[in-house]
Amino acid sequence: MKYIFVTGGVVSSLGKGLAAAALGTLLEQRGLKVLMQKFDPYLNVDPGTMSPFQHGEVYVLDDGAETDLDLGHYERFTSGRLSQLNNLTSGQVYENVIKKERRGDYLGATVQVIPHVTDEIKQRIYDVVDSTDADIIITEIGGTTGDIEGLPFLEALRQFKDEVGHENVAFMHATLVPFIKAAEELKTKPTQQSVAKLREIGIAPDVIICRSEFPIDNEIKRKISMFCNIKPEAVVPFVDIQGSIYEAPLKLYDQNLDSIICARLGLETAEPDLIEWRNMVDRIVNPTHTVKIGVVGKYIELQDAYKSIYESLTHAGAANDTKVEIVRIDSGDIEEHGPKKYLKDVAAVLIPGGFGDRGIEGKIMATQYARENDIPFFGICLGMQIATIEFARNACGLIGAHSTEFEPQTPHPVICLLEEQKEVENMGATMRLGTWEAKLASGSRSADLYGSNTVNERHRHRYEFNQNYKTQLEEKGFRLVGTSPDGLLGEIIEIPDHPFFIAVQFHPEFQSKPTKPHPLFKGFVAAALENRK
């Protein structure tokens, strides 16, 4: 087994997760089997209870683990299917250590950061090793080198390198090379200081990824090489990408990153086959068509809040030779000014997931506008619940219809809690999470798009469609076309006499890949393109 550890320095949000995922792509295209994981130093047990304003979207895995959005990059850029073993937080580490101490597992010893906390971190790597037949494990360490909460993770990696052998471990460090406008110069000092911090801990990077807005010349590379004790060819420029993030593997391939890593780890492989990837990038960067799709949400000003949805639209756009221009619409603005102002120029409307009652009425108004004006509509998770509420109110005349999440005393609870959920008080990991099977009605648009009557999709929600209203809604043209295998849980709704009206209780965006777009997104973008025409 070979190991690559990815650290970051100078500032956060450098894109080291993207760099790690891009490296994973290149190594897979060389014929190696790659598995990726993320270690996050924050003390939350997982990001499931964190605000999107703080952390961006929560990415859900097959086994129901609520994880960092970087794991979405990992699954989109590589073929690995990840599990709860692939995301570790300080919260999980300390929770496990305290549980062991309370059970007496440490036999009365004084519990300390070294060795007990660092052993727990190392054990997670060994657990992943035992769970896979991968050739390489790439582990990204969240945060910035020098952060106090990240020190136990770096110390654990230092120990781990000695345990498995220096020849089996490569360290890749991403730093910022800022451009100082007043001096009109790129500055290497922050990189030097960041690497010095790492070396104090006992870690010397084998590759330095230099993030910059401007090209990095050989003189800058030579300077970083000299001060950071690294070969000049291992100083890898990673200049801001103007087109698509899926260009990242191609940019890093041009800088020989995969060759450097393989040489460092003693791996002999063929050159990567990037033909399919290049073709996909070309379709994204140079499309024939353009279409505007309105995404109506409550965290709309945050790029990372709906990251997987935006990426899925990009994948589907490439499959349709179309650039998707995403029009971000705050549902609160629709409440104030009405839907027509914001939706009259879009070719389709998407309502994403979310929690809390802020902006709900705006989403309902947007859904009604799309339904009544034959605009292609796609609802995801909360979007399905919104579509149900809107149809119940405006097509069936059920005045006051709502979800008990937002209006506990609603006279028509078309969305409600299941009986077994009503006594749950904790917020963390109490939802329907992970991959669940769904049965689709033959002849439905969804079944046709999937090409199957059985699908497995990832969920993250607590409230469900109330099937006591199913008959009443279907009398007006509403169709429940997807359910759990036992028929008790609603999964997909459609309005058959609409150009495209599908809403799903699950999160299809978590299974879309650039080279394999999700069929529902692909069909939605095709419908938007047809509507634009």
Image (tube, rainbow, N blue to C red):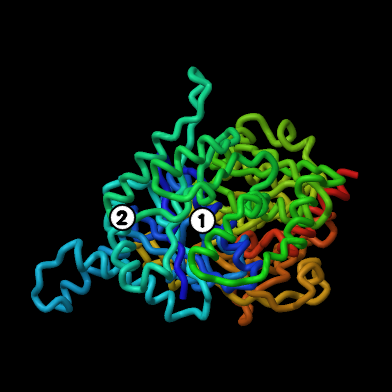
Q: Is residue 103 left or right of residue 221?
A: left
**Residue linked to disc 2:** 43
Relative to 239, 209 lies left or right? left
Q: Position of residue 329 (x, y in %)?
A: 64, 38
Q: Which mark is residue 225?
A: none
- Identified at 65% across, 57% down, the residue is 388
**Element at label 1:** helix
Check residue 70 in the rendering and tell me which mark sits there, or answer none: 1
User: Which label's residue is closer to the chain start, 1 or 2?
Assistant: 2
Residue at 38% x, 56% y: name it.
Answer: 40
Query: Label 1 is placed on what type of residue?
Result: Asp
In the rendered image, which quarter is residue 165 located in? bottom left
In the image, residue 289 lies at what x, y percent?
85, 45
Q: Amino acid at mark 2?
A: Leu
Residue at 80 percent of width and 51 percent of height: 283
Q: Position of residue 226 (x, y in %)?
A: 42, 42
Q: Is residue 21 above or below residue 432?
A: above
Q: Which residue is drawn at the image coordinates 67% and 53% (left, top)?
A: 250
